[in-house]
Image: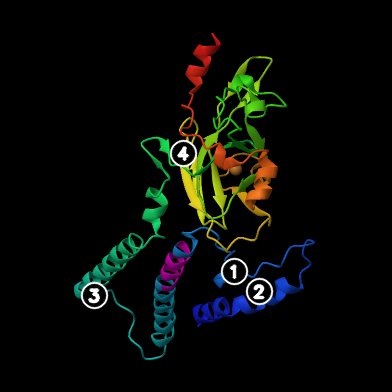
Amino acid sequence: MLAMALVAMLLAAPAWAQEKSADAPTAAGQEAEQPGLFWMPDAISTYGEGVDDLFVLIFWITGIAFVVVEGLMLWFLFRYRNREGREKAHYTHGNNKLEVTWTLATVVILVFIGVVQLVGDSGWLTIKTGYPEKDGVVQPGTFVVRVYGEQFAWHFNYPGKDGKFEDQRHSFKSPTNPIGLDDPAKDKVLPKLVVPENVNILIELNALGKYDANTETYTHPVLHSFFSPNLRLKQDLVPYHPGKIWFKIKQGTAKEGKKYEIVCAELCGEGHSNMHAPFLVLSEEDLAKELGYDWKTAVPAKFPEPVHYHQEQKEAE
Ligand SMILES: [Cu+2]
């Protein structure tokens, strides 16, 4: 009964959630976001809809199982409650046939979910294999960014006009060079992620340590997680193991210039909750203004080799 009421509430939610957001004050020039099914934020990546489909499918499978199991439990509690003249409950071994049936049914459901997300072009397989990069070479026409996460900030490193990323060392870090780029004037570093629409975007994720200029040592980077609810994308930043992610903004889904958000989704210290950055989808014109050059003329073919702590120390000696 309770479970049914809960499901009914969930189903009814989008209607009143929408009303509420329409009344809420919004920033100038920004439309109120229309929440999707179950309050989902707008999906703006090409595989976003596929992730939502999978979410809804799993929601219904587990939701129905939840209602059936809890419903039966409540019904049995009521049906076999203590009454005068009733026999006491006694232990029975169970029912082999029933147990084999529900084990096999679970296997079938799991295999079904596994197969479903392999087919089509918006499943898990696409997210994990669709990189616009082959054998370490970036495909032409790809928008490339190096992202650095540190306690507790995000830095977005775009290649400069020369179409190359600068090498990065912790010992180069300073207040005006927060990442520690070899020549920070040659690259573009922003505290926000800006991307174009409808092209492949390839991002390298790096965890950044802290540098102490007095002792000339740096503290090791820690785990963070790059999370964009609107992209339906989340990936850990593993120290010394740069990870790659890719996405493409589906044409017509993102509001140009609207402030979406990148957040850290891995508890990384006491400032973790402050670790978020703006994320904007821009027109080619606005993007050129932000970067100071036309990104299409400056696509790097490769990322610099990752540098490990010991290598950096050797270089320093
Ligand atoms: Cu964090």
Element type where label 4 sits in the image: strand
Q: Name the residue under label 3.
A: 98
Element type where label 3 sits in the image: helix
Label 1 residue near ligand 1, CB within 8 Å: no
Near mark 2 (Cα within 10 A), the count class, few <14, some 14-19 or many ≥20, is some
Queried whether the magenta region covers residue 174, the answer comes back as no
| Quadrant of res 120 | bottom left
Q: Name the residue under label 2.
A: 17
CB of mark 3 within 8 Å of CB of mark 4? no
Report the span colored magenta: 51-60
Near mark 3 (Cα within 10 A), the count class, few <14, some 14-19 or many ≥20, is few
In primary-sequence order, the first of circles 1 and 2 is 2
Q: Name the residue under label 1.
A: 39
Which quadrant does the C terminus fall into? top right
Q: Name the residue under label 4.
A: 243
Amino acid type of the residue tagged 3 in the rendering: Leu
Label 3 residue near ligand 1, CB within 8 Å: no
Residue drawn at point x = 43 percent, y = 45 percent: 132
Amino acid type of the residue tagged 2 in the rendering: Ala
CB of mark 3 within 8 Å of CB of mark 2? no
Confirm whether residue 84 shows in the render: yes
Element type where label 1 sits in the image: helix
In the image, residue 236 lies at what x, y percent? Answer: 50, 43
Judged by depth in the image, the label closer to the viewer, 3 or 2, is 2
Q: Is residue 96 left or right of residue 263?
A: left
* Cα–Cα gap, marks 2 and 4: 37 Å
Element type where label 2 sits in the image: helix
Residue 235's place in the image compared with 58, above or below, is above
Residue 231's place in the image compared with 98, above or below, is above
